Amino acid sequence: MLLKLLALGGLGYAGYRYYEKNRVDRNGVAFADGQPEGQFRDAGAAATGTRGDTMSKTDEALDETYPASDATAKY
């Protein structure tokens, strides 16, 4: 009985590790860890997935104005 429980626990743990290894990041590659789920992330270089890279002033300004710079389709 105890060996069956240990075997079942081992199978459960192995399945969990397999699931975590193959899990898809829902935010995508452009998002840093800790960003909220969804289509939008915080502005700035710290919110991107490549934290080691720095943004130029122009890139950061464009990144900060992204949602506001897109016209709404209310025609």
Image (tube, rainbow, N blue to C red):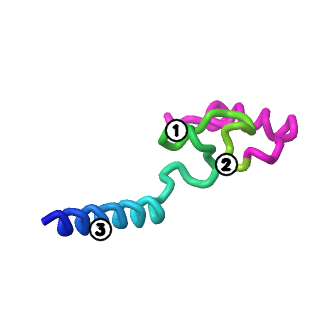
Residue at 72%, 49% in the rendered image? 50
Mark pair 1, 3: CA separation? 52 Å
Along the viewing direction, whichever of 12 and 46 lies nearer the viewer? 12
Q: Is residue 9 above or below residue 26?
A: below
Instruction: Name the residue carrying label 3.
Output: 11
Counting residues from the start of the chain, the first of labels 1 and 3 encountered is: 3
Q: Nearer the viewer, mark 3 or mark 2?
A: 3
Q: Is residue 75 left or right of residue 14?
A: right
Identity of the residue drawn at 27% across and 61% down: 9
Is residue 25 within the magenta segment? no
| Residue at the spot of label 2 | 49
Task: Find the distance from the CA under tag 2 to the CA under tag 1.
Answer: 30 Å
Q: Residue at x 50, y 54 (%)?
A: 25
Which sits earlier in the primary sequence, circle 3 or circle 2? 3
Left or right, residue 59 beside residue 16: right
Give the percent coordinates (x, y) of residue 40: 56, 39
The one nearer the camera, 32 or 38, is 32
- Which quadrant does the N terminus fall into? bottom left
* Mark 3 and mark 2 residues within 8 Å of each other at the beta carbon: no
Q: Which residues are magenta?
A: 51-75
Residue 73 has which mark?
1
**Amino acid at circle 3:** Leu
The picture places residue 60, in percent across and down from the top left corner, at 79, 36
Q: Position of residue 66 (x, y in %)?
A: 67, 37
Mark sitting earlier along the chain (2/1): 2
The local crowd at label 2, few if under 14, some if 14 to 19, many if 20 or more residues have their Cα within 10 Å, is some
Residue 9 in the image: above or below residue 35:
below
